[in-house]
Image (cartoon, rainbow, N blue to C red):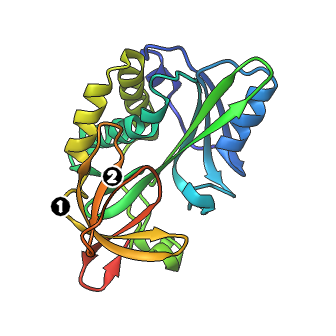
Amino acid sequence: MKDFDESKLSSLSHAVILSRTEETASTNDDLKAAARTGAPDYTLRIADRQLAGKGRLGRSFYSEGGLYMSILLPCREETISFLTPAAAVAVARAIEELTGKAALVKWVNDVYVDDRKVCGILAESVVTEKSRRIVLGIGVNLDTPTQAFPPDIRTIAGSISADRSALAAAILRRLFALTDKGDLALIRREYRELCFLVGREVIVHKENGCRKATVTGLTDALSLSVRYTTGESEDLVAGEISVRLFEDESR
C-alpha cells in the first residue's frame, strides 16, 4: 500500500478509526457494509485504488492513484442537506491551503482547479436497526498525468500535487468544523463564494431533454436558481448541469 502518515489525523476534533486497503470496489460500499455490522461513527476507509468508484447519478468515478476516502458520519437532520456543500467547501479550502491554487465548486459536488475537475463527492445514507447514518465519499485526483485518464474524461479531469495524509487531515478538519457547529449561514457564505456557476450560461439536463439557462444565484437551501431562455425560472434541488468553459467543450 502507499505510505500514509496516520499521525496527521491525531489532532482532529473527532477520533477517527482508520481502515486502509490497497484495492477495493468502493470505499462507500465498504463503509455501508461496516455500518450494518456495528462500525462506529467516524470510521474512515481509505483505498489506493477503487475498481468501481461511484459518482452521482450512477456514474463511475475514475479512481487510480489519488486520495479515495469515505467516512461514516452521524445523521444530523438539521445539517444533512448541507453535508455535500460543506464537504465541497472543505475540499476546496484544503486544496488552497496545501497547493496555493484557487479551487472552485461546480454545483453541487465537484471541485475544480485550473478549469479541471479534480474532486468528486458522494453522500449516501445507510439505515441500520438502530439508526440512520451517512457515508460521505471524497475522491481527489493526485499527480495523475492527463493521458492516464480514460479518453472520455481526458478533457475534463485534472489533478493536484499534495501529500495524501496531509490532504485527508485538512479536509476532515474543515468538514468537522463546518458540520459540528451547525452554522448553516457560514456554509452558505463559503459555498456561495466558491461556486463559479453564478452568472454563467449552463445546460440543464433533465429526463425529458436539455435546456439552456443562466444561473442567477443560490437559494438559502443552496438550490441552484436558473432562468431559462424562455424566461421561466426554477430552483434546482438536484440534477445535472453542464457549463461551457471553452468554445467547443461542455462539462
Q: Is residue 192 left or right of residue 251?
A: left
Q: Position of residue 28 (x, y in %)?
A: 65, 42
For the question of whether residue 155 can be seen, the reply is: no
State the residue in front, 75 or 175.
Answer: 75
Which SS class for mark 1?
Answer: loop
Residue at point 63% right, 60% down? 58
Crowd around label 2: few <14 · some 14–19 · many ≥20 (10 Å): many
Q: Position of residue 99 (x, y in %)?
A: 26, 45
Q: Position of residue 5 (x, y in %)?
A: 50, 29
The numbered dot on residue 208 is none
Residue at point 24% right, 84% down? 247
Whole-Å distance between the Cαs marked 2 and 1? 11 Å
State the residue in front, 40 or 48.
Answer: 40
The quadrant in which the C terminus is found is: bottom left
| Number of disc labels | 2
Q: In the displayed structure, would residue 185 be above or below residue 29? A: above
Q: Position of residue 201 (x, y in %)?
A: 24, 70
Amino acid found under the numbered disc labelled 1: Gly
Q: Earlier in the sequence, mark 2 or mark 1?
A: 1
Residue at mark 2: 224
Residue at point 20% right, 43% down? 193
Quadrant of residue 156 in the image? bottom left
Crowd around label 1: few <14 · some 14–19 · many ≥20 (10 Å): few
For the question of whether residue 221 can be seen, the reply is: yes
The quadrant in which the N terminus is found is: top right
Quadrant of residue 3 in the image? top right
State the residue in front, 52 or 21.
Answer: 52
Which SS class for mark 2?
Answer: strand
Amino acid found under the numbered disc labelled 2: Leu
Q: Is residue 190 left or right of residue 48?
A: left
Residue at point 62% right, 19% down? 41
Residue at mark 1: 199
